[in-house]
Image (spheres, rainbow, N blue to C red):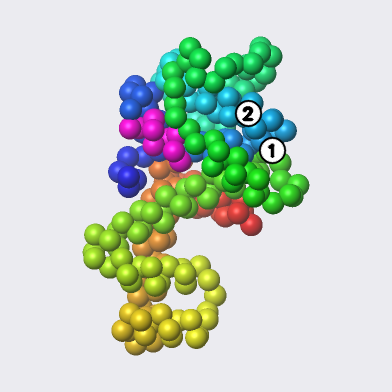
Amino acid sequence: MAFATTRWSLVVRAGRDAGDALADLVATYRYPLYAFARRRGTAAEEAQDLVQGFFAALIEKRFLLAADPERGRFRTFLLTAFKRYAAKEWERARTRKRGGDRTHVPLDFEAGEARYRLEPSDDLTPERLYARRFALALLERVMDDLRRDYGRREESARFEELRPFLTSGPDADARAMAAQRLGLSPEAFRVALHRLRGRYRHHLEAAIRETVADPGDVTREIRDLMDALA
């Protein structure tokens, strides 16, 4: 699904209808929240319960109806809502049986835990890890959107050849080989790569614009997300 609707308007739609809009939110942002909970020291099974319960609560209690884009960044709203939910669950200090009397939201936690085990052992706080994983989830969606863009132009092969050079430094031999495979001259390859980077920037700015309340915050949000990846 391309960024046909804003993340904020997607939140509002998900609050009214637990359908595709909510499924889209779950698929994209479940792992950043799971990684946050695990880095906080929460056991794997409990973290699974928390994320599962959080999204179920969004459906049952329609928490998203209270979401207000004017409050700021989407990623901040999502984490704040999850923290509040987790705090209430921890305060109750009771174990819930997954899938009990709650609305079921299918989540692939085995894959999530496998990913978490590959996280580097560093001193990132739970909030910093969440910001990093949120940024990566957003960038993955931008790349998917860009891939579809090239696919619609019947240029999928060109995209796959150019993609490794999107953010990497110059590598004359690798570029020459890729240009040869595409049947492009070195200059034509350079132009094609420049266009790819321009399209990427366009999609990235569009995606970021959809996660902030004020369009003027786009540059700062991009900088903050890039800092989270540093």
Q: Which mark is residue 13?
A: none
Position in image of residue 127 (x %, y %): 65, 39
| Quadrant of the snapshot with the N terminus | top left
Position in image of residue 190 (x %, y %): 39, 80
> How dense is the environment of label 2, judged by Cα within 10 Å: few (below 14), some, or many (20 and up)?
few
Residue 73 as seen in the image, left or right of residue 124: left
The mark lying in front, picked from 2 and 1, is: 2
Tag 2 residue: 45
Q: Which mark is residue 39?
A: 1
- Disc tally is 2
Depth order, front residue of 230/100: 100
Position in image of residue 62 (x %, y %): 42, 18
Quarter-of-image position of residue 158: bottom left
Depth order, front residue of 216/205: 205
Which region of the structure is painted magenta?
20-28
- Earlier in the chain: of badge 2 and badge 1, it is 1
